[in-house]
Amino acid sequence: MGHLSKVEIRRFKRLEHLIIDLDQTNVLIGANNAGKSSVLQAIHFAVSVAQTAKLLGGVSWRRNSYELSFNPSQLLYSPVADVMALASGGTLVEDANRRVEIVFHSADNRTTTVAVRRGRNRNIGVSIEGRSLGEELQNLTRPFSVYAPGLAGIAREEYYMSPGRVRRIVARGDANLVLRNVLLMLQGHEAAWSEFCDDLTDIFPRLSFKVTFEESTEEHIDARYSVDGAVDLPIDSAGTSILQATQLLAYVALFRPTVFILDEPDSHLHPDNQRALCKVVTKIAKKRNVQVILSTHSRHMIDGLRRKAKVVWLSRGSIVEPPEGESADLTALLLDLGALDSVDYFTDGELRFVVATEDENPSYLQELLWASGFVRDEVEVVSYTGCTKVESAIVLGRFLHDKAPNVHMVVHRDRDYLTDANVSDFKGALSKHNIFPFVTAGSDIECYFVNADHLHHCCQSISRQEIDQIVAQALNETRPKSIGAIVNLRTEQAFRHRNKGGDAPNHGRISTEAHAEYDANPPAMMRGKVVLKKVRQLLQQRLGSNPRFLVASEYLCVKELSDILQKQHSDTVADPDQDVLPGSMVFDTQSIDIRGSAEGEAAIHDASPGHVVVQATSPNDGESPSIEDGAPDR
C-alpha cells in the first residue's frame, strides 16, 4: 500500500474545496470549528464508503470505476447520524455537480475519487473512480485507515466478540470500545504481539501485558498489566497515558493501516504524557511505515512534532500560510499566547481594535476603554499570557496585520514600577511596528479606579468628603502591602539584572528606597489592586452592600487611550476634561494628604480647584528590567 501524497475534499460539511499536501506525519492545528476534525472525518468516511460497498456485495468494477446505491444506515462509519447533512450547506442533493467528493492521491501517482450524492428512496448514490487505489480502500482485513479518538478511559468489562465484528467496530471509528478484544486478537499472532510488546517497552520500559479468555466458560476478556513483573492489575485501572499508548500501538500492530487518524489524542493527557505520546506517534510512523494524520490544540504536541511532521494550519476550512518572513515557530508562539483560536474572529470584518492584555480579568481595562470613547462593538479585549514581551507583541501584531489589516492592535501593560526610561523603550519598540502601547500611569490598571470622583459617581449616597476620607484610610492601611509589592517587584528586577551579568541584589537598599518612594508620593506608588480591595471593604461596611466600581464614568477617561482612538477615529475624539500630562493621574486633594506633612505635599502640584496632578513615575536611579523581560508576574 502506498502513502497518500495529498487529499482533496469537496463539499464535505464546511469544507467547500480543500487540498492538503501530506507527509508521513501530519499535524492539523487551528481554532475550534476551523475544519480539523472535518478533514479527518472526510478521509475515514470515504474509506468507510468503499468498505461498505464491498461488504454489501454490490461492487462491479467497470474498468476503472463503479456505481452503487444503498441505505446510509448500512455505512460502517459516518461522523453524524444523518448522512444527508454531511454535504456543504447541510443537505445532500442528487445533482452530480454538487456531490461530496474525496480524492486520494498516492505517492506512486495513483488517484481514487470517492463521491456521494443523494439517491432514490432515501438511499445514497456512491461512485468510485480509480480501481487500483480504490481496491486498497475497500480492504477490511488490513484497513486503509484506522480512526482513533482521544481516549479518556475504557469500560470496566468487555464481552468477547468475533474478529469480524471487531474489525467492523474499528472501521466504524469506535476502536476504543474493543481494546481488550484487539489485545486478545493481537496475542494470537506471535509476531505481531512481539512487535507490539517491543514498541510498548520503548515508551514504558517496565510495563507488560497479559490477556486471557476461555471461550468455553467465560464471557468477558481479562486484560491485565504489571510493572516490573509485580502484581497484575486490571487494564481499566491503568492511567490514561498507558491506555492511549497501548491503543495506538496495538491497532497499528494488528491492523497495519496505511493511514492512522488521531483526533486530538492529547485530550486528558498531562503535558509530560503528551510528549510521551509524540514519541509513540513518531515511532509508529517511522518504524512501522504508517502515515499519521492527527489534530491537536496542544503546544506540547506541536513542540514534540513540528520538526518531525508537516504542520497544517486550518482556518474556516482553508489553509493558513504564515506571514512572509515568519518561521514555523509562529504557530507555537500563537498557541503559547492563546491567540490561535482568536484568528477567525479577528478577521470577520467587524472589529477595528484588538486590545491585548495579560490580565486574566479584563473588566477594568474594558471600562477604561469605554470611558475613553472606544465603541464596544468595534473592540475585542483578549487575554494573552506573555503578550507584553516585546518580541511576542511584535510577532502577534505582524500576524494580525497580515490577516486582518483593518484591525489595529493595542497592547496593555501595567507599569509595575518601571522607570520612565523603560516605559519609553517599551512604547518605542511597539510603535515602530504600528502597535499602540498603553502603559498604566500607576502601578496597575486598578489605580485608575482609586479615584474619588469616580467612587462618588458609583456611590452617590455617600458624600464626596466621606469618599475622600475612605480613600485616605485605604491608602494608609495598605501602606505595608504596597511597599511590599514595590520591594518584591524591584527584587525580581534586580535578580534578572544579576542573571545578565549585573551586581547581586542589595536587599537593604531596595527596602529603604521602596519606603522612601512610597512615602514621598503614596498615590503614585500605591498598588492599585490592594488599595481598591480595601476601599471596597470600607465602602461595603458603610453601605451594607457591595459597591459597583465597574462603571464607565467620565472620570475614568484616560488621555493616552483617547489619543490612540483619535489617530484612527478622527470623528470620535474623546477629549479629557483636564489638561493632564501623559503618565499622570488626577486625584482629589483631600484623598491624598494622608500624612499631613510638608514632605507629602512636596510631590503634589495644583491642577484645578479641589484637584491635584500626581506625576506617576518611578525614580530612574534604581535597577529595572529590560523590556524583553516582560512584565513581572502579577
Image: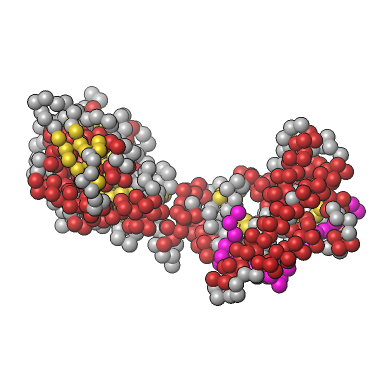
Front position in the image: 13 or 225: 225
The answer to which quarter of the image holds residue 56 is top left
Q: Is residue 420 left or right of residue 51?
A: right
Is residue 630 within the magenta segment? yes
- First to last magenta residue range: 607-634
Residue sitting farthest toward the front: 230
Q: Would you say residue 525 is visible in this rendering?
A: yes
Q: In the image, residue 272 lies at what x, y percent? A: 37, 52
Please say if 125 is above or below 361.
Answer: above
Give percent across and percent down for residue 286: 21, 58
Residue 613's spot in the image, x, y percent?
82, 58
Note whether 549 is above or below 272 in the view shown. Answer: above
305 sits to left or right of 603: left
In this picture, residue 578 sits left or right of residue 170: right
- Residue at position x 56%, y 47% in the image: 350
Name which residue lies at 60% across and 72% down.
504
In this rendering, the count of numbered labels is 0
Task: State the colouring used for the structure image.
Answer: secondary structure
Relative image position of residue 166 (x, y in whole percent): 17, 34
Residue placed furthest toward the right? 609
User: Residue 123's quadrant in the figure?
Assistant: top left
Within the image, what quadrant is residue 521 found in?
A: bottom right
State the predominant SS element of the stretch in magenta: loop
- Residue at the spot 80% in from the left edge and 35% down from the top edge: 542
Specify whether residue 93 is in view: no
Location of the C terminus by quadrant is bottom right
Q: Is residue 605 left or right of residue 514?
A: right
Magenta-span inclusion, residue 49: no
Name the residue at 57% across, 72% down. Answer: 498
